[in-house]
Image: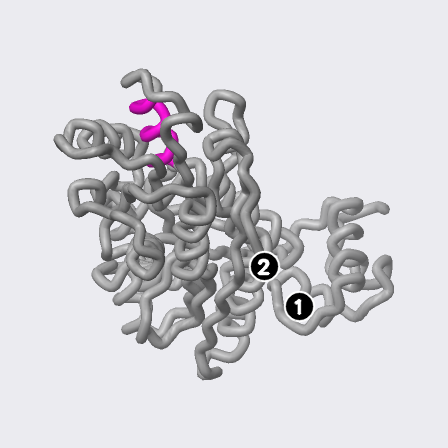
C-alpha cells in the first residue's frame, strides 16, 4: 500500500469502523475478541503506527499500565509479569515496572500517578503501609490488587484461597502421619503470609499437631531466610519437625538446601512443602511439593477489572478469590493429597 498507513486504511482492511480501530488501540472494554484480534492482525501486517502524542491529548489515555512488584529476583514475580504482558498486549497496552522494595520505585510510581503518565496501576505486593497504594487511592487512580490484597481498601482485588490451601497442607501432613510440624513464615504485613500462616496454624491446632513456637520462624520470603529458619529449627534443642511448610517456594528451596547440608534426607526424614509453584519447584534439584496459584486466571481477571475501572471509575469495587491446588512432588515422597 502506497503512502503512510492511516487508521482509515486499517478500518477498511479489518472490515470495521475507525471508531472500532480506535477503541481496540486504546484497550477499551466491550470489543469482541475476534474483532480485536482482526484489527490487531491488520495493524501488525501493515505496520500502522498511531500518533501516540495525539492520541494521548485527545483521549487522555497513555496506553501504559504501571505494575508495582516486590523483589524481582523472586521467580514468582516474573511469572506474574509474563502473564500480565500477555493479557495487556491484545488491548494495545504496554506496561512499565516499578520495584516496591526500593524507595525510588515507590517514588517513581507516585510521580507517574501525579503526572498522569499511566492509565492505571496493578499492585502485586501491596500492603496497608504502601505509600504508592495509598497515594493512588487518594488520587482515585484506576488500580487493581492481584496476589496480595488489603482488606477494607476501596479498590478491585484478586487473590487466591491462601488460608484454605494452607489448612489443606496441614491436613496433608496429618493424613500421612506427621505429628511434629514446623512453619517458615514471613511478614504479617503481606496478606499472603498472614493468611497462609493463620490457615496452617489453626488447622494444625484443630488436628492436634505439635507446632512448637521454636519451629515457627520468619524466612522473609527468601532462600537465605528459609535456609536459616530450618537451621534454627534443627538447633532448637528439641525434637525437630518431620514436616515443614514454607509460605513461599523460595524459602522452601532454602529449607531443602539446609536439610541437605545437615545430612537430613528429604523426604525420608523431613517433608517440605512450599507455596506458589514457581518453575524452579519442578526442577530436579528441588522437586518441591507446593501450592499452585492460578496465576493466568488471576491476571486475566485483574486486567478485566482494571479496564472496567478505567472505563467506569465510580463502579463498586469487587474482590475475586480463586482456589489453589497442591502439586505433589519428591519433597513429600509423591504422597497423594486425600480428598
Against 281, residue 102 (above or below) is below
Horizontal side of residue 111 vs 337, given as left or right: left
Q: Distance between the residues labelled 2 and 1?
A: 19 Å
In magenta segment, residue 251: yes
Helix, strand or loop status at disc 2: helix
Instruction: Determine crowd level at label 2: few under 14, some 14-19, many 20+ residues with C-alpha closer than 10 A.
Output: some
Which residue is drawn at the image coordinates 34% and 39% (left, top)? 244
Relative to the observer, which residue lies in front, 122 or 148? 148
Quarter assignment of residue 21: bottom right
Residue extent of the magenta highlight: 250-259
Which residue is drawn at the image coordinates 31% and 50% (left, top)? 209
Against 252, residue 22 (above or below) is below
Relative to the observer, which residue lies in front, 139 or 127? 127
Instruction: Determine crowd level at label 1: few under 14, some 14-19, many 20+ residues with C-alpha closer than 10 A.
Output: some
Assign the C terminus to one quadrant of the image.
Answer: bottom right
Q: Name the residue under label 2.
A: 300
In magenta segment, residue 130: no
Which residue is drawn at the image coordinates 26% and 48% (left, top)? 210
Helix, strand or loop status at disc 1: helix
Quarter assignment of residue 55: bottom right
Against 304, residue 85 (above or below) is above
Q: Is there any visible trace of residue 119 in the rendered image?
A: no
| Dominant secondary-structure state across the stretch colored magenta | helix
From the top left corner, tell me how far across and down residue 147 is, in percent.
Answer: 43, 56
Quarter assignment of residue 120: bottom left
Chain-order first, disc 2 or disc 1: 1
Relative to the observer, which residue lies in front, 303 or 178? 178
From the top left corner, tell me how far across and down residue 278 is, in percent.
Answer: 49, 38
Q: Mark 1 points at which residue?
A: 23
Res 89 label:
none
Amino acid at each position: 500500500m502506497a503512502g503512510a498507513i492511516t487508521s482509515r486504511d486499517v478500518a477498511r482492511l479489518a472490515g470495521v469502523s475507525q471508531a472500532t480501530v480506535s477503541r481496540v488501540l486504546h484497550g477499551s472494554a466491550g470489543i469482541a475478541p475476534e474483532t480485536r484480534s482482526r484489527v490487531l492482525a491488520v495493524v501488525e501486517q501493515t505496520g500502522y503506527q498511531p500518533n501516540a502524542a495525539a492520541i494521548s491529548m485527545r483521549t487522555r489515555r497513555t496506553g501504559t499500565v504501571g505494575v508495582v512488584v516486590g523483589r524481582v529476583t523472586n521467580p514468582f514475580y516474573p511469572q506474574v509479569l509474563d502473564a500480565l504482558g500477555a493479557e495487556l498486549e491484545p488491548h494495545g497496552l504496554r506496561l512499565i515496572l516499578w520495584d516496591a522494595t526500593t524507595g525510588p520505585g515507590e517514588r517513581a510510581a507516585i510521580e507517574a500517578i501525579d503526572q498522569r503518565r499511566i492509565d492505571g496501576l496493578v499492585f502485586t505486593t501491596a500492603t496497608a503501609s504502601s505509600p504508592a497504594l495509598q497515594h493512588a487511592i487518594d488520587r482515585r487512580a484506576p488500580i487493581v490488587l492481584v496476589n496480595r490484597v488489603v482488606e477494607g481498601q476501596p479498590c478491585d482485588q484478586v487473590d487466591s484461597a491462601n488460608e484454605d490451601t494452607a489448612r489443606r497442607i496441614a491436613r496433608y501432613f496429618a493424613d500421612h502421619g506427621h505429628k511434629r510440624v514446623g512453619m517458615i513464615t514471613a511478614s504479617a504485613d503481606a496478606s499472603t503470609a498472614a493468611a497462609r500462616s493463620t490457615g496452617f496454624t489453626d488447622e494444625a491446632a484443630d488436628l492436634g499437631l505439635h507446632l512448637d513456637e521454636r519451629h515457627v520462624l520468619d524466612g522473609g520470603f527468601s532462600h537465605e531466610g528459609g535456609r536459616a529458619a530450618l537451621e534454627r529449627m534443627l538447633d532448637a534443642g528439641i525434637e525437630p519437625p518431620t514436616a515443614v511448610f514454607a509460605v513461599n517456594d523460595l524459602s522452601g528451596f532454602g529449607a531443602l538446601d539446609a536439610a541437605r547440608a545437615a545430612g537430613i534426607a528429604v523426604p525420608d526424614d523431613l517433608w517440605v512443602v512450599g507455596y506458589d509453584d514457581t518453575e524452579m519447584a519442578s526442577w530436579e534439584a528441588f522437586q518441591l511439593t507446593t501450592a499452585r496459584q492460578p496465576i493466568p486466571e488471576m491476571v486475566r481477571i485483574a486486567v478485566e477489572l482494571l479496564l472496567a475501572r478505567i472505563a467506569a471509575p465510580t463502579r463498586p469495587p469487587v474482590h475475586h478469590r480463586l482456589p489453589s491446588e497442591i502439586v505433589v512432588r519428591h519433597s513429600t515422597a509423591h504422597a497423594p493429597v486425600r480428598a
